[in-house]
Image (cartoon, helix red, strand yellow):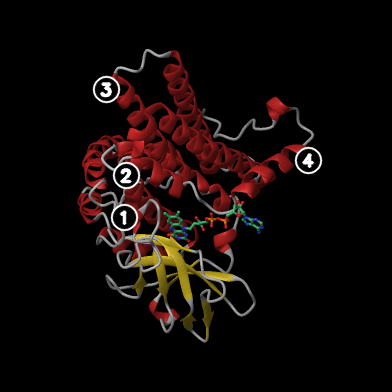
Amino acid sequence: MTLDLIRRAEAAATPCAAEAAALDRHGAFPEAALGRLRTGGYLAAPLPADLGGAGLCEPERVAALCSLLTAIGRGSLAVGRLYEGHVNALALALRYGSDDARASLARDARAGHLFGVWNTEPEPGGLVLAEDALRGAKSFASGAGHVTRPLVTARLADGRRQMLVVPLAPGERADLSAWRAQGMRATATGRVDLTGLRAADAAQVGAPDDYARQPFFFGGAWRFMAVQLGGIEAVVEAHRAHMRATGRGADPHQQARLGRALIAAESCRLLVARAAEAVAAERAGAERIVAYVNLARAAVEQAGLDVIALAQRSVGLAGFLEDHPLERLTRDLATYLRQPAPDYALTSAAAYALAEEAPLPALWDGLESEQR
Ligand SMILES: Cc1cc2nc3c(=O)[nH]c(=O)nc-3n(C[C@H](O)[C@H](O)[C@H](O)COP(=O)(O)OP(=O)(O)OC[C@H]3O[C@@H](n4cnc5c(N)ncnc54)[C@H](O)[C@@H]3O)c2cc1C
């Protein structure tokens, strides 16, 4: 079942790549791609079998989920971003939600609702939950106007944060006016003011501050890295295709650049797969898992920046023209590489290694499940 989902995702990603150029405009949204994911059963797939899904959030399926996110990201980073948000919201609901919340949110996913996680917020003006009502907004919320079941975090009077899944109608409360971004234009990333919504109409997920529990919180970065890997592969593929089409691949400088790009992509693939396994297995302590995921984050960010620079130098000016596939692929990847606190990801991994007594080869031992 899961293998079949991945095979079909590869096929579903092909039209995404073809559609991506037409969707590269402010205010666009990949309706057709989301429609294909909906009818293909991908919106329910993260749910366990007893809730009507394919169990993609279960630890033993982590490699399948990783491949799926990469395949979708390879076709379109915008679609990958939206699907990753959907999976993240359901993963949080499945992990922390009560049986009733899990059942009702699973029903919504099966009915085709798109989920997302909206945590980032404007300062001042962030989301507050007081006297059973929400006040304030979320910013950089992807799928705004299309995500009808966002999982949001809202600050309580004591400063802790509560997860809630709020029901929204299509188009409701979405303000996309500020999303005039260099790339990732088709993600409908905007500001959503949720003032006045009643908590009683939302599904509460978990206890206050469950959202920030480790290693699931920082560890969950493996999913966006899996999508970014798809974007990295798409850039390297466009680079390679250009070398072949122009007959310039025999030049040693061109070969060296493509070789370095291939190393970057393959290093990311290995790191992301291991980070995903480490988070799913939860075998090591939270601090060690998070340190490894942060290390992978820093590596993937650098690899993404490197493959962009290598491809642009190899292809030259043609890669900056709108009719060349590389032009949009590099803008989308450069934009999607921006994730929270990248400096902290690198330095906190280094700080972990400095504090540990274990010799270097043992530092990351035993992260995966014992079956490996
Ligand atoms: C396409 C796209 C879609 C998104 N969709 C969503 C969504 O649906 N939901 C959501 O919640 N968010 C979303 N986001 C937002 C995302 O989660 C991050 O919040 C955002 O990308 C952070 O990027 P930033 O570069 O502003 O990060 P920052 O963390 O502000 O980093 C910018 C720079 O400042 C440094 N820095 C960070 N903190 C400090 C500090 N305290 N002191 C000094 N320097 C610091 C960093 O290391 C970096 O160099 C989306 C982002 C993108 C690109």
Q: Residue at x 36, y 39 (%)?
A: 320
Which circle marks residue 76 in the picture?
2
The answer to whether residue 278 is seen in the rendering is no
**Judging from the image, what secondary structure is the residue with disc 1 in?**
helix
Q: Is residue 287 left or right of residue 21?
A: right
Query: What is the CA distance from the residue labelled 4 to the residue labelled 2?
Result: 40 Å
Mark 3: few, some, or many residues within 10 Å (few <14, many ≥20)? few
Which circle marks residue 355 in the picture?
4
Query: What is the CA distance from the residue labelled 1 to the residue labelled 4?
Result: 43 Å
Mark 1: few, some, or many residues within 10 Å (few <14, many ≥20)? many
Q: Residue at x 39, y 45 (%)?
A: 331
| Residues marked 3 and 4 touching at CB (< 8 Å) | no
Which circle marks residue 186 in the picture?
1
Q: Amino acid at mark 3?
A: Ala
* Front tag of 1 and 3: 3
The answer to whether residue 170 is seen in the rendering is yes
**Judging from the image, what secondary structure is the residue with disc 3 in?**
helix
Which circle marks residue 245 in the picture?
3
Q: Say if 254 sits above or below 61 in the image.
A: above
